[in-house]
Amino acid sequence: MTLDTASIEEALRARLASLDEGLAELTAVPRDPMSAVSFGKRIGDGTTEAIDRMTKVGTAEQLDVMRTDVVRALAKIEDGTYGLCDRCGVSIADERLEARPWSVLCVACASRRAG
């Protein structure tokens, strides 16, 4: 299969904009940044707020990792290496690139990264 890098680049740029928007929402300073967040023994507003913030931090970290891969994939399009694994240099399966155009690692290397 021949990769249509123009449409892939367009999709990656749209994904990058979406990630930036999501990260901006997740990392926005709360209305009252001076309010204390407590982990009390009873479930209450403070505990709920703290759990919400922890969840947002985890989600923001995941989005940031994806954003890094999207930026890297765009750079690979520019330098002509899109579709090649950053770690081992083999071609990334077309099916993987169709499902995740921001993939910069082949399946084997990506599974080692997660492990």
Image: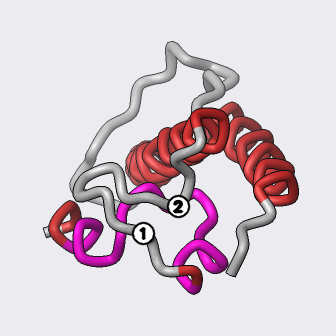
Q: In the image, what residue occupies the spot 27% across and 45% down?
A: 39
In 3D space, how far apart are the residues under numbered discs 1 and 2 (Cα atoms)?
6 Å
Residue 92 picture location, percent across and down: 44, 71
87 over 4 or under it: above or below: above
Q: In the image, what residue occupies the spot 59% across and 70% down?
A: 100
Residue 109 picture location, percent across and down: 23, 67
Residue 93 picture location, percent across and down: 48, 80
Residue 4's quadrant in the figure?
bottom right
Residue 28's quadrant in the figure?
top right
Is 109 on the left or on the right of 78, as rendered? Answer: left
The numbered dot on residue 7 is none
Residue placed most toward the observer, 115 or 46: 115
Q: In the image, what residue type sits under mark 2?
A: Gly
- Is 91 inside the magenta-drawn segment? no
89 over 26 or under it: above or below: below
In the picture of the structure, the residue carrying the numbered disc 1 is 91
Q: In the image, what residue occupies the spot 30% across and 59% down?
A: 42
The answer to whether residue 44 is seen in the rendering is no
Badge 1: few (under 14), some or many (20 or more) residues near its Cα, within 10 Å? some
Q: In the image, what residue type sits under mark 1?
A: Ser
Q: How is the image coloured?
A: secondary structure
Q: What's drawn in magenta, residue-wise?
A: 95-111
The kind of secondary structure element at disc 1 is: loop
The answer to whether residue 114 is seen in the rendering is yes
Is 71 on the left or on the right of 111, as rendered? Answer: right
Residue 47 picture location, percent across and down: 38, 50
Tell me, yes or no, whether the two marked residues, 1 and 2, touch with CB atoms within 8 Å: yes
Is 20 on the left or on the right of 61, as rendered? Answer: right
Sequence-wise first label, 1 or 2: 2
In the picture of the structure, the residue carrying the numbered disc 2 is 83
